[in-house]
Image: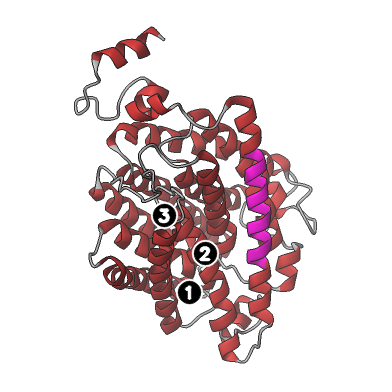
């Protein structure tokens, strides 16, 4: 069978796996939120995914993969990209779109339970079209300046996860804490999610989808290297859970389910940059450290008075930073030569060069995405507002934004509130 045909099917199959992660994110976020917001979370996930599909087709893909040092300047609506004898551009687009949609889904964690539905629509469009593609081009574009410096980010610890995590933390700071999250003395209150089974099931779907995310980024089945990438990915995920369990037991003296969930995810996030560059033992260490630091970061950020409802910045931002730096420490000469990007890590005789490139990539990503997200959300706030009213938040976004609850038989509204909503 023609190799291009085989690789085309492989990339398409992996794209479908990554798209399935959207279902995982919907379950994870809905389960981690209160029942009165579950339908809203599911709806915005579907709507924002739809908008991202159009925006990435129109301009996002071209901005990443068109020619140019700072940004691609061709390929609008997929025109003029790809050639005979290669995987069709439509299949590559689907795969890359799935990644962009994951980054956007990560960002939504910082908006949860208090943002207007219109904010998801506008920010989803702008983030997918103009924010995400710029960093994507710098790192993955053939002429991108970070790519030319040798930045190692095999499947997106920086491009996908750090971008989403930074957008989430900027959003959660601008939106301010949910009603009742903090007391007058700034001590936090627990606002538990309504369904831990959903959160765990969502995490398992995301874990499975990650086998499209990382192994799919080999873009070929020809030499079987995708199997090795799958191995390091799986090891890091398991180690992430163990690291989080030990850290939360040490800090809180109890093992809470959300921290186990976030440990798995942080291990996956961290290994995403390094999965093709490091040995199996290093993947275990990377995942374990990611799980531990995610727990510590989550607790510390909450103590600062920041309400990040599903710990999106800790899981995807902090673990993304660690994963990006880890290649500068553990990348082996043999795997670097095989992948063909960058230099060996510090512990393999590569000195500080690769670590410095990785750190530079982190710094410029945080600065660009942080400023861009702040400006876009500030503009949206001026034009129509970011946050629902306190009363709308109290009755739930299912009702205030959509006119009905996701679990209508479980929640009975006070007659006065229901009548007021119907009258308006």
Q: From this viewpoint, is residue 82 visible?
A: no
Residue lying at 45% horizontally and 76% vertically, measured from the top left? 286
Question: Dot 3, how many residues are within 10 Å of its Cα: few (below 14), some (14-19), or many (20+)?
Answer: some
Residue lying at the far front of the rendered structure: 185
Q: Is residue 224 left or right of residue 78?
A: left
Q: Is residue 150 left or right of residue 209?
A: right
Q: In the rendered structure, which disc, 3 or 2, sits on the residue that comes first in sequence?
A: 3
The quarter of the displayed image where residue 183 is located: top left
Residue lying at 28% horizontally and 54% vertically, measured from the top left? 200
The quarter of the displayed image where residue 27 is located: top left
Tell whether label 2 touches label 3 (CB within 8 Å): no
According to the image, label 3 marks what residue? Answer: 302
Residue extent of the magenta highlight: 361-376
Out of 219 and 28, give the one closest to the viewer: 28
Q: In the rendered structure, which disc, 3 or 1, sits on the residue that comes first in sequence?
A: 1
> Under tag 3, what secondary structure?
helix
> Under tag 2, what secondary structure?
helix
In the depicted structure, whether residue 52 falls above or below residue 292: above
Q: In the rendered structure, which disc, 1 or 2, sits on the residue that comes first in sequence?
A: 1
> Under tag 1, what secondary structure?
loop
Distance (Cα) linking label 1 and label 2: 26 Å
Number of numbered discs on residues:
3
Estimate the x, y position of residue 175 in percent, counting from the top left: 51, 39
According to the image, label 1 marks what residue? Answer: 224
Residue lying at 64% horizontally and 37% vertically, measured from the top left? 378
Estimate the x, y position of residue 189 in percent, counting from the top left: 32, 47
């Amino acid at each position: 069978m023609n190799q291009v045909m085989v690789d085309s099917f492989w990339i398409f199959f992996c794209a479908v796996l990554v798209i399935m992660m959207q279902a995982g994110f919907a379950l994870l976020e809905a389960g981690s939120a209160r029942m009165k917001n579950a339908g809203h979370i599911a709806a915005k996930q579907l709507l924002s995914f739809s908008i991202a599909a159009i925006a990435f087709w129109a301009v996002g893909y071209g901005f990443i993969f068109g020619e140019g040092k700072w940004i691609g300047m061709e390929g609008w609506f997929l025109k003029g990209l790809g050639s005979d004898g290669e995987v069709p551009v439509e299949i590559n687009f689907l795969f890359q779109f799935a990644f962009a949609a994951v980054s956007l889904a990560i960002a939504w964690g910082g908006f949860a339970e208090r943002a207007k539905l219109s904010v998801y629509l506008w920010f989803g469009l702008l983030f997918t079209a103009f924010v995400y593609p710029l960093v994507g081009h710098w790192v993955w574009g053939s002429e991108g300046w970070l790519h030319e410096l040798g930045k190692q980010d095999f499947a997106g610890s920086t491009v996908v996860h750090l971008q989403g995590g930074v957008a989430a933390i900027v959003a959660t700071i601008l939106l301010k804490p949910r009603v009742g999250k903090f007391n007058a003395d700034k001590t936090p209150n627990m606002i538990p999610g309504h369904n831990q089974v959903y959160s765990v099931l969502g995490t398992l779907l995301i874990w499975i989808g990650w086998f499209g995310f990382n192994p799919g980024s080999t873009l070929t089945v020809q030499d079987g290297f995708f199997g090795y990438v799958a191995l390091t990915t799986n090891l890091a995920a398991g180690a992430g859970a163990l690291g989080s369990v030990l850290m939360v037991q040490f800090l809180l003296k109890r093992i809470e389910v959300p921290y186990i969930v976030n440990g798995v995810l942080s291990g996956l996030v961290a290994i995403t940059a390094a999965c093709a560059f490091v040995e199996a033992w290093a993947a275990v260490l990377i995942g374990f450290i990611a799980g531990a630091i995610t727990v510590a970061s989550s607790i510390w950020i909450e103590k600062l008075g920041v309400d990040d409802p599903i710990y999106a910045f800790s899981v995807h931002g902090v673990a993304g930073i660690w994963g990006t730096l880890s290649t500068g420490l553990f990348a082996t000469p043999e795997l670097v030569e095989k992948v063909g990007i960058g230099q060996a890590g510090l512990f393999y005789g590569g000195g500080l060069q690769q670590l410095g490139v990785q750190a530079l990539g982190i710094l410029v990503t945080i600065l660009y995405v942080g400023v861009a997200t702040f400006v876009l959300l500030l503009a949206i706030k001026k034009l129509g507002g970011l946050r629902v009213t306190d009363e709308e938040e109290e009755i739930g976004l299912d009702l205030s934004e959509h006119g009905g609850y996701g679990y209508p038989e479980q929640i009975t509204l006070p007659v006065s509130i229901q009548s007021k909503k119907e009258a308006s």
